[in-house]
Amino acid sequence: MFSANETDFIIAAWFLVPFVILSIGVNKDIRFLLPILPVIGLVTARLFFRAVPKRAALPALLFCAIPIFNFFNTTFPISDRSIYIAEFPLISYQWENQVRRPIKENWRLDDILGDINRDAGDKEPAVTMVVDHQFINAATFDFYRNLYKYHMRLGTIAYLPGDEPVSDIVNGLSGADYIVTKTGFQGQPGSNAKNVEVKQLLLSDQSEFYVLKEYQLPDASMAVVLKHKQ
């Protein structure tokens, strides 16, 4: 179909175009490399078969079968058990808390937004997040808001300056109609520096908010929805 030169040009363009375009952007998230991973695999395979003698190709491919099997086992696991050879994880169920079997959990995001939407009625409420957990944050709530086409405004106190007084943060929340917070683990400290103190003031007797509803979460904590006393 293609000559050798045409093939080389296609492979080079496939790699360079996404690489250059995505390198210009400010966000250098690792997931942006996904478009060029196939071509990296093709180039690696091509160099492999050029460099390795034909007699050594089969043993080398058999050796590659171990990481390939481990990849599929951690992505589509067939067992909960890890198998080690001389402390090397031949089959890994959990490696440094990053690789584990996929599990299905319900973090109640759709329930929380649905209840707020029903309680607000025809009003377009302002909902502020006083939590920046990996599963409960402004971005994940925004996904469900768009999915169900709820008319509400979402905000967050995450990433405020570390020296921001707690009282000023609480006063800034007076414009919110609803506040979503969480007990237990809040998320990364950098984006949750004032969460605990803010939550304590919000739940005090002098607060402008009261607890509307609580939701049990998979990590044994509770999501708490507060409503403004209007």
Image (cartoon, rainbow, N blue to C red):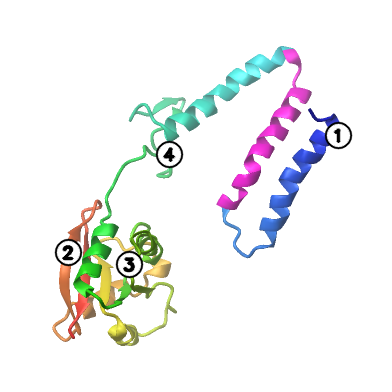
Q: Residue furthest front?
A: 122
Residues in magenta, as a range: 31-54
Return the residue at label 4.
95
The mark that comes first in sequence, 3 or 1, is 1
Q: CA distance from mark 4 to mark 3?
A: 39 Å
Which amino acid is tagged 1?
Asn
Q: Is residue 190 above or below residue 41?
A: below
> Which of labels 1 and 4 is toward the front?
1
Residue 201 is situated, as x and y percent measured from the top left of the image, at 22, 80
Identify the residue position indicated by label 2 in the image. Answer: 214
Q: Which residue was labeled with disc 3?
A: 150
The residue lying toward the viewer, choosing from 63 and 111, is 111
- Give the overall secondary structure of the magenta segment: helix
Q: Are marks 2 and 4 in contact (CB under 8 Å)?
A: no
Q: Where residue 49 sits in the image (x, y, percent)?
A: 74, 23
Q: Where, quadrant-wise, is the C terminus in this rendering?
A: bottom left
Q: CA distance from mark 1 to mark 2?
A: 64 Å
